[in-house]
Amino acid sequence: MRAVIFLVFAWSFIFANTVIHFDKGWKLVGVPTTLNDMRGFNNSNVEVVWAFNATEQKWEGYSPEPSISQKISDNNISVLNSLQPWQAVWVLSKEAWGLKIQDSNSHLEPKNNSIVLKQGWNLVTIPNKAIVWKNFFGDAVVWKYSEAWSVNDDSLNFPTITNIKESEGFWVKSEKDLLIDMGEQLSKLSTFDSEANMLSYLREMQTSNFYRYNYSNATVNDSNNTTPDSTDGTTTQDGQKDVDATTTNLQETGVDESDILKNDGKYIYSIDNVSKQIFITSFENIAQKNYKAINTISTSQQGSIVAMYLQNNRLILISDTINFYYSDEESARLTDEELSYTNTYKNKDNHTVEITIYNVSDVNNILKLSSQTIDGTYEDSRLIDGKLFFITKFNPEIEYDYPKVYVDSICSTLNLQEVYTACSYSIVPVGTGAYNQTEDCNNGDDYNKYQDNQCYIYHYDKDGRTWKYDYEHPTIKREKLVPNIVSNGVTNVLLKPSNLYAPQKLDQAASITTISSFDINSAQYKESISFLGNTHTYYASTSSLYLVSSEYPLYYGFNDFTQRQMIYKFALGDTLSYKGKGFVDGKMLNQFSMSEKDDYLRVATTEANSWGGIGTKNSVFTLQENNKILEVKGSLIGLGKENETIKAVRFMGDRGFVVTFKQTDPLYTLDMSNPLNPKAVGELSIPGFSRYLHVVDENRLLSIGRDANVSTGRALGLQLQLFDITNFASPQLVSKVNIGDSNTYSSAEYNHKAFVYRPSDLMFGLPHTDYIYESNANDYQTKTSSTENFTIYQLDGMKIKELHTISKAFSKNYWGDDKRGLIFDLNNTTYGTLFQGSDLVSDTILKGK
């Protein structure tokens, strides 16, 4: 028998209200907090408590009974007076009882974030909320008792430990004195020596995570991207420069990013998810207002096309698909068409991503070169010098069958009628599980027994017998633990034990993030590398890929909502390789919160407290890889005024720019030339805030953001701002353009790809939508119409000039495709075009250029 640990999930959980239950007999447990005395064990049901002093390799004892306490003293055994969070104890109980622990600081916080081991034997526990893998202590021998002894050494003739949980006591034999940092050890990544161990780990992680109530983490779709660097013009498929056209706005030169609109200098490719095709036209045709397709590529994907690349006569399409299929019972009710589809996909993973590569050297004779399907969902990608680096996420699946166990418990003897009546529940037939609480309830002896003994985990049959599901001994009905890749009809497992990096912490979402590489010239899949982590923010330089996670491990405190994020680094060479990981305090805004220069990673974060924007801290860190660790080498703390958060970031060379906001917009200029000592050298406070920063040159900085009410901070209309940064220590606002009002929206605020910029003549543009609302008799506003626009501007010295606005009401309902603008020159004339799928409109901007 073993102790059952549970947390009371309510707002009182903030104060770490924990109950450890003891059955009659011996229990080996840990108490997840510091006990400065033994009053909690001063209970009539306790006979004796034994701890092991690892420093002296001797036992210490405590008993609330004077006679036993005297025997401890008579045998020259030290009295147990206190316990550290990592110390475990043997407890002999006469009857079942519960130890209630109340602490004003949650034991989830990093204050209990270490384990002290001494050379020799140690009787310890996991001091914070975690379930860890059996190899947590490396080569050290670990013995655990839970109904029977088990050990982490497969060569011994004992059951094998699969995991170690918080408050479970266990023995560790250490070869030397060690101080184990829980955060460091929990997040340490290592691979597997066999497929069996890899699958065992994934199975254990999925099972552990199944019971965890995930109250703090959510996947973040990083759509709030921002920043520049487009190429200077484009080239045609035969290598001849044809038009001076804008292309996808990139964060880093040489690192291509996917988009829904691409061109090669002659032909333009646009994703149309309404018709599930790629619409192809030419600059010459749209200059003549001929909007008919030259050709189209129809796709067979069931999902939507989420990304597209065009490089070296190769068009790469990426589609994210959800395959809906049914059980045999449900299939009996399907139509023939539905049944055909179900039979086609019933053996596939529910989520798949398809990568299709075409040869478009002859736009009239497009050839499909390859098709690969990967189990999971699409996260992000980059294309560098003919190599596509592709990030997917896969969630292992296990379907369980839980046996029903009848138990004799105090819950069986409670008068449930009185419990429900005292709690003002409406009474329903026993066994239905239905009830309705009508008012607060926290009184009555039966109710207190009901709560203290966790009677809510039990069910009652029609005869009033008590039973529960045995979640500890499930039967696996079906499982799929690793993703597959199907390349041109051939299926292979995507993961290898030697290329899957896993942390020691099991009680996290069992999400496998995989980086796969493809050679677009040969149209072939090359290799993959994976790790356990639910990542959400991605940045790539020409040589490295960084992935960010908020989950390994969880870092926060309920009292002040402190937060940390993990950064994983992978090298993008001839082969993929894991380089290391590191922590930063706070949360990044988006991919532009990161930038690599001279082997240093620069990171900007906001650390927020009290579940919101109160007591914020804005920082910039520099990190460098050293022996698999991204070490913090420099920091700049305290950007922004009280309660401000970062709204925009841009690093460019030895310079950095950070915008914070609450009511006004401080723009900070940063000197990043010394990565060991980043400095804020300039500051400018103005109304509103910037979301996107575009470095024009060493003297000018352009931004897209919002005007705002100075007194309240309420966001108003869109605005463009131009800053003079000639004197880097004293940036000045020199030009501003307001666009619409608070009902005007532009995806360029959040997605840098919606912003187009041409460095040859400093011309740029952004799409925006103007929504029109009318108030009814109850003063409730309803949207009545909207106008789609693409406005083109040009920088003239230190001034923003508005050149032209293209407007159109698109005929289709594009649920998956954003709008994109395009600026190009042809036959001595400048044109602007607004695309949405296969809908487009073009106008002349300037003639006689």
Image: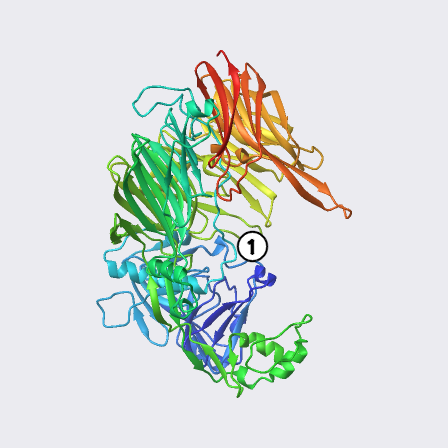
Counting from the top left corner in percent of width and height, residue 494 is at 28, 51
Residue 613 position, x and y percent, is: 60, 44
Q: Residue 184, how many percent across, how many down?
A: 39, 50
673 vs 712, nearest the viewer: 712
Label 1 packing within 10 angstroms: few (<14), some (14-19), many (20+): some
Vertically, is 833 above or below 326? Answer: above
Image-quadrant location for residue 665: top right
Instruction: Name the amino acid type tagged 1.
Output: Phe
Residue 304 position (above or below residue 207)? above
Residue at (37%, 31%) from the top-left corner? 255
Please state which of residues 836 and 622 is positioned toward the viewer in this rendering: 836
Q: Residue furthest left?
A: 155
Quarter of the rendering occupied by the N terminus: bottom left
Determine whether 300 is above or below 271 in the image: below
Q: Is residue 760 left or right of residue 238?
A: right
Picture coordinates of residue 445 (x, y %)? Answer: 63, 80
Q: Residue at x 33, y 55 (%)?
A: 177
Q: Say if residue 720 shows up in the picture.
A: yes
Query: Helix, strand or loop at disc 1?
Result: loop
Question: Is residue 166 among what the camera can see?
Answer: no
Q: Which residue is mark 1?
A: 558
